[in-house]
Amino acid sequence: MEKIPFLLSFLLISAGLVGVVRGRIDRRWFTSRATALLPLALGLLLLFLTSAPPLGAAGRVPSPIKAPLPADAVLSYLEPIVRAGTERGDHVFPDQRRSFPHWERQVLEAHRQADGALAQVPKVLDALNRGDIDRFTAWVRLGVLAEDVRQANLTIHDLTPPSLLDLRDRHTLEEALADLKTSLEQKRRGIQKLQAFVRGTDARDLTAARLELDRGHDGMVAGLTKMLRVKARLGVGDD
């Protein structure tokens, strides 16, 4: 249902543009460029009203949203706990141990991109509250940050566990990747809910944003914990 206003506005804009360029659409309705401007104007107005707040919109928007903990910080906290509770595996070959750090760096580098975007979210809301930006600008910036998180998620989506590991460890890392991908998608949805909140200041959107961000954090913890279990079994970092 939310797509109907957008599709309608798109059709009106398209019809208006065709009429403006060609001078008419048919002989009955839009017989001149002037009359073709009517659907174009209606389409732009509908798109503007349904997709973003007015340019001049102002007012304080509460920002009780804190930047989610980055993956590096969570890893630093979890690693000694997981390592203490995980037995090192038997018959681990040196090439298996060497393959894990490179894979781990790839995962964390992608996650750092998402963490960088997520760290900017509270700053956007704070700038809005200070009056440095209006609601439309905040809405646009949040959209860009959501896209940054999506791009990081696509990078993780393309990663696969090291082929040198045994089947059990590869399966565990596949589960870890699935958790991290779901986590980033939930965080992206959280930013999108904040966009909706900035646009309409509906408290339900703010509640939904908190819920999605919290779920994303829990998923990240689950994924990183599984990564660390494999790391501990391989004995990476024991030296």
Image (tube, grey):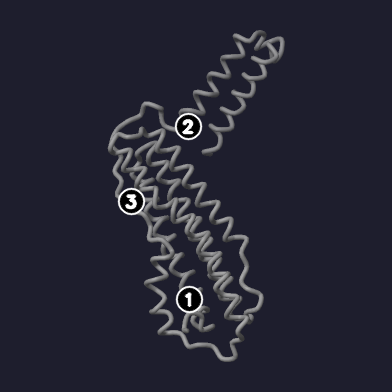
Of the image marks 2 and 1, the number of the one nearer the N terminus: 2
Can you give x and y, in whole percent of width and height, for residue 205 in the image? 38, 45
Give the residue at x 57% y 69%: 103
Task: Give coordinates of residue 33: x percent, y percent.
Answer: 63, 10
Q: Residue at x 61, y 64 (%)?
A: 159
Mark closer to the observer (3, 2): 3
Of label 1 and label 3, which has the lower sequence position? Answer: 3
Query: Along the polypeptide, which appears first: circle 3 or circle 2?
Result: 2
37 versus 162 height, above or below: above
Residue designated by label 2: 50
Tell me which amino acid carries mark 3: Ile
For label 3, the residue is 65
Q: Residue at x 69, y 12 (%)?
A: 24
Residue 136, quarter of the rendered image: top left
Front residue of 105/5: it is 105
- Residue at which label 1 appears: 228
Amino acid on which the number 1 mark rests in the picture:
Leu
Which of the two marks, 2 or 1, is nearer to us in this view? Answer: 1
Q: Amino acid at mark 2?
A: Thr
